[in-house]
Amino acid sequence: MDEEKDELRTEGHHQEPEKESNDEAEPMDMEASMAYAPLEEVHPGEIVKGKVVHISNDGVLVDVGAKSEGIIHLQDLSHRRVDRPEEVVHLGEEISVYVLGYEGEEGTLKLSKRRADEMVAWERLEECLKTGEIIEAPVTEVVKGGLVVDVGLRGFVPASHVARGFVNELEPFLGQTLRLKVIEIDRAKRRAILSRKVVLEEEAKQAHDQLWSTIEEGQIREGVVKSLTDFGAFIDLGGVDGLLHISEMSWSRIKHPSEVLSVGQTVRVKVLRLDREKEKISLGLRQVTGNPWDTVAERYHEGEIYTGKVVRLATFGAFVELEPGVDGLVHISQLADRRVQVPSEVVHVGDVIRVKVLHVDPQAKRISLSKREADEVDQEYDLPQESSEEPENPIGERLNAYHAGNWDDEG
């Protein structure tokens, strides 16, 4: 048996590689092989199962239940280019093979795993073309004009069918497994055309219809930031984009959406308005976090001192941000213990200052503040009056306790 295997390997090693067209029809080989057919249990043109019993550098021996093993040369193992048989088969593995015929004076049974795989693949592709079934296939090559995918044979995905839009670079798809639909088959020309674009468009339509059938105003939805503009952000809700206007992003004033969001970020948003006819969706982000003014009285008490940031100047005073979405007004008369002509004499936008709460009106969304009275406390207890750092928590329990009237002494 070992001598027979060596002879087959040597014979296969010196044989010229078979051309692609020879696989389609081999009338001379087929006629010659008929002389051996009565001696064997398999016949040319059949697909049979066999067991891999030996592997060499240039091919493998397969036991198909005949009087002798059949040989599969390297070029007949796969439609892909392979350097070693172990890339395709393993010792002891059961595989399907196509009986090509017989070769050599000894009438060695010649088999092809590639032909068997391709015949099965063609049948499957033809069925998928009829039914519209989605198949998965890895990208094995990037060629001019598209991608080559392995569907049991060489399938082709044109560049125009790789995605819904234009794809500039195809290299990133190499090695990926794509979900595809068969759109054209020509078995005689060995051509199988597939499309990823068709799959994506059908899925997008399904997602679109599903969203519009379930979305309602007031719902909280999860989405992904698709793009940013000066006036807002477009949020992908799963097949449909909604507009999140800049005014609905934060309870505090922002100059650009990038201060709050970034492309690709996942966010929870509230559906504010729907226009089903025009298919427009207006979204809100700040509504999900809650209005800070609803609980502002729980955090800011009259008589206590807090740290804030000057965010805007007006002729009548300065607006100080105590937290995002909560601004208080320091009237011009409360800026200093002297007469002030304009607020910029005392403070500037961006300054971090301490202020005393004079009055809180949650319903009107107003907080009256005093820098002058806070400065008096600072001077009395030798506390710093200004800071270039961002505001933190209230200035401390001792000072809060003092204004609450329960601080007995300074020690």
Image (cartoon, rainbow, N blue to C red):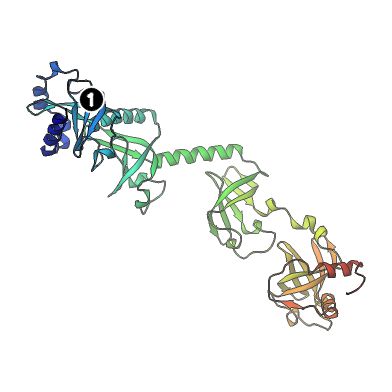
| Relative image position of residue 5 (x, y in whole percent) | 16, 31
Q: Is residue 362 visible?
A: no
Q: Is 19 rendered above or below residue 233?
A: above
* Residue 16 position by quadrant: top left
Q: Farthest residue toward the top? A: 38
Q: Is 208 rendered above or below residue 361?
A: above
Which residue is located at x 87 percent, y 67 percent? 401
Which residue is located at x 34 percent, y 52 percent? 171
Of residues 369 and 205, the one nearer the viewer is 369
Q: Is residue 21 visible?
A: yes
Of residues 294 and 303, the one nearer the viewer is 303
Specify the quadrant that holds the N terminus: top left
Q: Is 26 rendered above or below residue 36?
A: below
Residue 159 placement, left or right of 200: left
| Relative image position of residue 233 (x, y in whole percent) | 57, 56
Numbered disc 1: secondary structure? strand
| Relative image position of residue 203 (x, y in whole percent) | 47, 39
Specify the quadrant that holds the C terminus: bottom right
* Residue 229 position by quadrant: bottom right
Q: Is 24 rendered above or below residue 175?
A: above
Q: Farthest residue toward the front? A: 2
Type of amino acid under label 1: Asp
Residues packed near mark 1 inside 10 Å, few (<14), some (14 to 19) or many (20 plus): some
Label 1, on which residue?
63
Which residue is located at x 66 percent, y 43 percent? 219
Of residues 107 and 367, the one nearer the viewer is 107
